[in-house]
Image (spheres, rainbow, N blue to C red):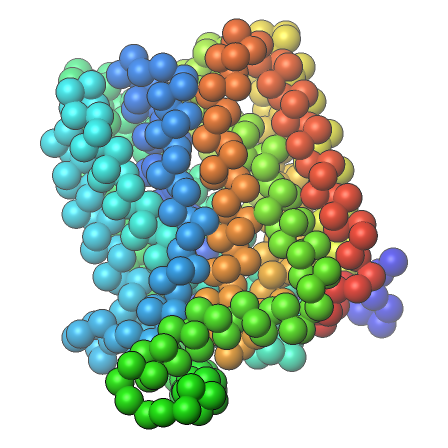
Amino acid sequence: MFEKNRTWSESILVYKDIRMLRILLLGAISGFPWVLIASSLSLWLKEEGLSRSTIGWAGLIFGVYAFNYLWAPIIDRIQIPFLTKRLGHRRGWIVLMQIIILFSLIVWSFINPTENLALLISVGLVIAIASATQDITVDALRIEQINADEGKSMAAGAAMAVVGWWTGYKLGGVIALFTAEFFQNIGIEDYWQTTFLVLGVVVILMNIGLMFIHEPITTDRQNKQKETDEVIQSKLGSNNIITKFIAYIAGTIGGPIISFFKKNGFSIAVGILGFVFLFKIGEAFLGRMSIVFYKEVGFSKGEIAIYSKTLGWITTVVFTLLGGIFAMRAGTIKTMFVAGGFMAATNLLFAALAWSGKSEWLFALAVIADDISAAFATVAFVAFISLLVDRTYTATQYALLASIGTAGRTTLASSSGALVDWLNGDWGTFFIITTLMVIPSLICLWFIRNKIKIGAK
């Protein structure tokens, strides 16, 4: 099962590479916006008296993550005036998106949710679009930190990216929850609006940290893309502005898709896409409603911050790193089977918490088990799609695969609140249903497990 001739200590040493620290920061930059449009927005709306269904449907703004591959080719080619020359192509795009997020937080600080819900959700959509666009560049920059033939380093990099993402999300959540509770306790009426100004400062600090991440300078990707454009243009039989535009569109959007199906074959490619789409649906249903569930069971913002955010972050960091080592030694496919089964089983703990009522030890146990399974699942998933991409289309092809995975989690999981309402608030049955949701993805993975063309299975 495990790779021979490599000890655990030798696997751990892979994390000493300085590139892993850079990838950690990139992950944090990517994860932080989810604090804003996931837990913070959901709790803000809950405390303003909005229904579970409204909160669930507000999550449709996450749907933009499912389609960010559509503009990934633009990010691969278009340079940002001033920023690209000063910071580099990838970093220039990231900083631009961070600026948009910062200004959106400032706008949020002036909005009353009950009076301007449409405006509030619209600004949330802007944050989601900026975050989804930023993710394209972050993922490309993260993959390009590691050479294509460094399979073990890619697995380690995937682990560090996941640790970074959860660091940005979990610790960002701790800051958001404790800050909101502090402002509420001292009597500030619009405590969430004030909290978003504090979170804006975190965005600024992340931009400062970004300056310490080196961007590899290479023109090979652009040259190969131009070669593809020229081949397509030669097929069109003429050389003018119209054929050049057609060749550009076909080369940047069609090229990555054709490359993916050509490499894997149609049936295996469809199996891969099916698995990617379905793998984390159950986890997404649970995650979308988790903070609402915690609140209804009777936990305070402070307790949620300690158990779900702080404790969860520590667990996630430790077991993501262990998951990276496990993936390096056992392979990403085996790791995903293990994680999928564990992910389904741990959802049962939330059902037990729902049926038992408020219990701090059961809450802690459920959060720890969920974070362990999520850590293993995510690191294997990220390594899996990172190894699948063609370096000629790093941003576009990774964004395509990641977007398909996000599509299942965001579009379907938006009905999570409606499902709880349909069950008349029966949280236990809801979590049983989320347990069963992982099975279809593992069936897809079983049929394609021996035919996937990646460096290490």
> Do we see residue 409 in this rendering?
yes
> Do we see residue 20 in this rendering?
no
Q: Which of 111 and 393 is in front in this view?
A: 393
86 lies above or below 317: below
Q: Quadrant of residue 346?
A: top right
Give coordinates of residue 437: x percent, y percent: 66, 32
Give coordinates of residue 121: x percent, y percent: 26, 33
Taking 237 as reference, is 388 left or right? right
Residue occupying image coordinates x 70% and y 28%: 436
**For the N terminus, which image quadrant?**
bottom right
Taking 250 as reference, is 366 left or right? right
Q: Nearer the viewer, residue 368 or 419?
A: 419
**For the C terminus, which image quadrant?**
bottom right
Q: Which of 378 and 73 is in front in this view?
A: 73
Residue occupying image coordinates x 80% and y 69%: 6
Residue occupying image coordinates x 79% and y 64%: 451
Taking 32 as reference, is 139 left or right? right
Residue occupying image coordinates x 54% and y 30%: 285
Taking 323 as reference, is 229 left or right? left
Give coordinates of residue 78: x percent, y percent: 28, 74
